[in-house]
Image (tube, rainbow, N blue to C red):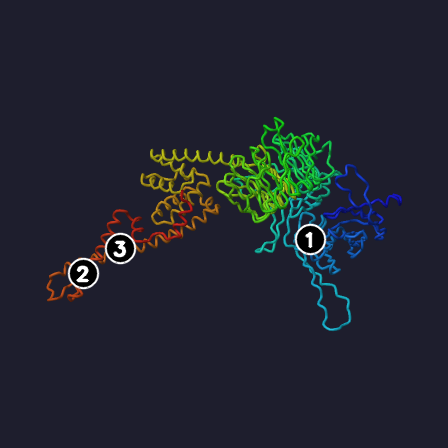
Amino acid sequence: MDKADLTIPSHFSVPPSSSCVLACSPLSTLSLYTLPHPSHSSSPPLTSLNTIPKTHSLPPIHLTSGTSFTAVLYSDGTVKVFDHRTDKLLCTHMHSLPGCTAVTIRESQTDVLLLLSAPSGVHAFSLNAGAVVAVLVDGLSAAGVHFTDSLIVTGGDELLFVYPVPSPPKPPKAPKGKAKKQRPSPPPVLRVPPLVTIPLPASLNSFSNLAARFFLSLSDASLMTFRLLPPSSTSAAPAITKIVPVTYPDDGPAISFPATAVTSFGHSLSLTLNGETLLHLSPPLSLPTDPTKYAVKDVAELTLSLPPVISLAPLGETGAAIVTERGGVIKYDLATKHTRPFTATGTPTAAVLCVAASPDGSRLVCGMKDARVLVFDSDGNEKEALRGHMETVTSVACSAKRGKWASGTQWYASASKDKTLKLWSGGKCLASVKAGDKDVNEIAVSPNDALVCTAGADKTARLYKSGTLEAVATLKGHRRGVFTAAFSPVDKVVATGGGDETVRMWSLTDYTCVRTLQGHAGAVLRVCFASAGSQVVTGGSDGMVKVWTVRTMESCTVDGHEDKVWGLAVMPDGRVVSGGGDRVNVWKDNGEELAAEKEREREADVLGEQDLANAIRAEDWGAALEKAMAMEKPETTLKVINDMRAAGHSLDLHVRAWEAERVSQILRYARAWNSRALNCGTAMFAAQAVVKNRDLDELAAMPEVVEYAAAMKAYAQRHFDRLEGLMESSYAVDFMSQLMGGMEEGEGAGAGAGEDVVGGIQLDEDEVKEFEKKRLVAVEKIEGVAGKVAKKGLEGAVEIIGFSSDEEDDDLMNEDKD
């Protein structure tokens, strides 16, 4: 290589949220360039802002940039930090760490840390202190260093290590009085142990992170992902979600060799595979918190890096038009999962800020930053250019009735920062009206094209007649600006969402608020009706997409965004497309499927109840027992076993034929039955059948059986103690019987005046009366108890004497009630 080749940059870095790029050549020449505007159709050369020749005597091996600073690592382990906020590229810090292989820069409001990877560990160099303040011990950094807001992650071999971010050092206290200025001593170096060590299924080649989600490239050619949650108030260690593989779309690349590098690029993931780079949007999302409503289906893994989404509209049956922060429009096909930029013959030079589409997808209406409204056909040919607004167009809408599009009488509506609402048809402005005291954020059109609703920043929503834009009503109730509005497809209702975190539903009959939905933790930015008007879907600045049932006002949240949800659309097939500052998601309403499944389960339960009743009526106890246990009915099972005992049947044949799961089930039932003295006989009958007919080693190997047996033993001991007390009470009955017999023998047997002989004991008159009174009470109680005992038997006697189960017993029994 000659000397001229050494001037070509070998390392590049793009600071976050910046329009510049830094480059360093093998001769250590550091250059700052401006990036061209995305609207350039060609690729103009980069404009150099500043160049610093020979920043070091050895070539660079790593270059990284933060928001304000850029760090360059050279081959001798020297790291130099440059301030790129100005064109001068001033070198502010320098540090040397022999064997350093990589550097990562972390900027916060309080300090800037350089994380230097070396064989001795990861060294945290503080720019405020100008020295190393911490060393992350026991960790490997062969695969790199990455960080979240409060955590640092390093990796190598088959391990990942998670560390807390070292606290910035406190500045030394100034000495009191006049003293000689002394050079401040360096802060002590903290040795930081890992909070969590994560084992991996294979060696780690490379990894990167997007926010709190990490992506790992392993040596077995797999790409894995997991989410890292910060420590909670109850635990100092962060929470680690399950490490799962990243799946690719059916028409995506077939990966059969490991990725050599995994890096994040904007909102996408960059995989380098044998020199070929593939970009993917952040892959799988977590399931919704309530799976009975909306569930994740085919989350779009776009093979395109999407900037944050600011507007979204359905385009035909399976398409969606997506407006990004860069002002471009992207067409996404839900059927094929393919995306492509929307290219038009009259490509606008100004940015697109909002979009709407006709019901049949034949027209795409774009609101422009230069105050125009452009209408394109599905092939990208410009059909109309509507001029009349004085400022940026903030929202557009068009006729909702398909018949008007078929007859060519369709119209368009647009709102602008000039506070006006305009109606267009045939390339002309039909009507214009001032729509409030502040900006109009969104426009909605009623399903019959009769009304137009505006959502304004002045805390109101306003209704107008579509033909003349004559004011109909002003809806007041939101405490902050209104961001969105949508008409119900079936009811005379319009829904609005605002910055006060509420969704309000207004009657179109008397224009009053009939319902208020609360649940978002931020402003409600988008609202749509779904499921034929029975549900409302909302997206908010809190990153949540919520689904509300209009009738019950219940809601569920689907977890899929970590940034504001500015785009929301309901497709004709019921799927919901949501777009935010982080990604685009596609959701499917599985409510009908779940309802059908529940109906099938209900029908099966009804048929099972009929079969069970028939078996009991026919006294087919074996079939009744099997059916009751299969239907998980412990009370019915108890009744069937009682009837079997009364008829002299045994459980032996059933117990021998049962699977282990059924044996565990009958013992679980017996544990609950045994908690009541009235059912303890049946419980012991079932337990005896199990012990007699099943292998004891098999039972001992079942942990739940050991638990059930211990509980039954405790309750059985209580029942035996109660029976023992009953036996002791029977001795008292016997004694009283003998005493009464003795008193009858002593009556009139030679007692003196005023005296009686009772049981051989001579008593005076008052003692005899008192004894007689107590005897009559005792006889009455004994006769009542004896009668009930004779009627119910021994088990009934346990309950009659008063040894009934307490509240703890009843709670245990209620666990297995039908």
For the residue labelled by badge 2, is the local secondary structure a helix, a strand or a loop?
helix
Q: Position of residue 287 (x, y in %)?
A: 57, 42
Q: Between residues 320 and 689, which one lies in front from this camera angle?
A: 320
Q: Is residue 372 visible?
A: yes
- Nearer the observer, disc 1 or disc 3? 1
Which image quarter: residue 388?
top right
Q: Quadrant of the N terminus?
A: top right
Which image quarter: residue 483?
top right
- CA distance separating discs 3 and 2: 21 Å
Write down the residue under mark 2: 772
Which image quarter: residue 122?
bottom right
Q: Amino acid at mark 3?
A: Ser
* In this rendering, position of residue 594 left or right of residue 377: left
Q: Between residues 5 and 398, which one lies in front from this camera angle?
A: 398
Q: Amino acid at mark 2?
A: Glu
Write down the residue under mark 1: 139
For the residue labelled by badge 1, is the local secondary structure a helix, a strand or a loop?
loop
Write down the residue under mark 3: 730
Looking at the picture, does residue 759 appear above or below residue 264? below
Q: Position of residue 265 (x, y in %)?
A: 71, 44
N-terminal label among 1 and 3 = 1
What's the residue at 64%, 51% (across, down)?
A: 197
For the residue labelled by badge 3, is the local secondary structure a helix, a strand or a loop?
helix
Q: Quadrant of the C terminus?
A: top left
What's the residue at 35%, 46% (across, down)?
A: 679
